[in-house]
Image (spheres, grey):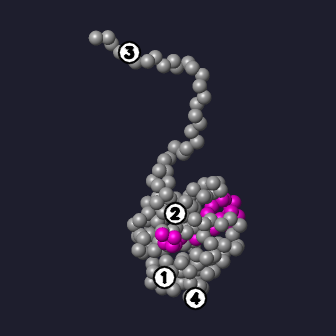
Amino acid sequence: MPTIQPPIIPTNVDRPLEADYSSSQSDDYDALSRDRVPVRSMTDADLDAVIAIDRRSMGEDRSAYYRRRQREVMRESGVRISLVAEQDGHPVGFIMARMDYGEFGHISSEAVMDTFGVDPGYRGRGVGQALMSQLVANLATLQVDHIRTELDWNDVELIDYLDKLGFSPAQRVVLSRNLAS
């Protein structure tokens, strides 16, 4: 029986190499979450849905806050980066964010994530992951270095969630003073 030899592949053949522009850190999970949950830019028409999602999540009416935030992110920000996630054509989650080019004498390109929410009926379905993934992708295109947010020290559930999304404590100390005392 004759022996079959594997083909000889020359190693000195000039052939173009395909350029690999992908990140060394795979974002397959993020990309898949964006595929499962459509995410788009926020519009003025989303305000009522955002207020309704927050009311169901927080159990209180904060519509005045959201009207003010919507005005700021839609009209006073040079770059609109706020997002809405949809399921069956209806908003089920949102991130309100803005660009910040520095403060306190420091120049930096960072985004400030002011607030976000996911309808309680859609939690655990990748809505928050899809929103954050799209926000990060959009900010990377804008060459933004960091995303900053603030939260209550005792909100352990939110701290844990943001930790899983890659957030960590910042090297800043925020001080406040009660003027009533």
For the residue carrying disc 1, how many other residues have a C-alpha within 10 Å: few (<14), some (14-19), or many (20+)? some
Residue 152 percent location from the top left of the image? 48, 74
Q: Amino acid at mark 1?
A: Arg
Who is closer to the viewer here, 174 or 130? 130
Q: Is residue 21 visible?
A: yes
| C-alpha span from label 1 to label 2 | 22 Å
Question: Which residue is depicted at the point 66% across and 77% down?
Answer: 71
Element at badge 2?
A: loop
Q: Please say if the residues under marks 3 and 2 sit with CB atoms less than 8 Å apart.
A: no
Q: CA distance from mark 4 to mark 1?
A: 30 Å
Magenta stretch containing residue 43, yes or no? no
The region drawn magenta spans: 88-112
- Residue furthest front as drawn: 1
Given this view, does label 3 or label 1 mark the residue nearer the observer? 3
- Disc 3 from disc 2: Cα separation: 52 Å
- Residue 40, horizontal then vertical, whole percent: 57, 65
State the residue at coordinates (59%, 25%): 15
| Residue beneath disc 4 | 180
- Residue in front for this viewpoint, 99 or 95: 95
Q: Residue tagged by mark 2?
A: 38
- Residue at point 63% right, 80% down? 68
Q: Amino acid at mark 2?
A: Pro
If the image is split into quadrants, where does the N terminus sit? top left
Residue for badge 3: 5
Mark nearest the camera among 1 and 2 is 2
Structural distance between the alpha carbons of marks 4 and 2: 46 Å
Among the two numbered marks 4 and 2 on one chain, the one whose residue lies closer to the N terminus: 2
- Residue picked out by circle 1: 55
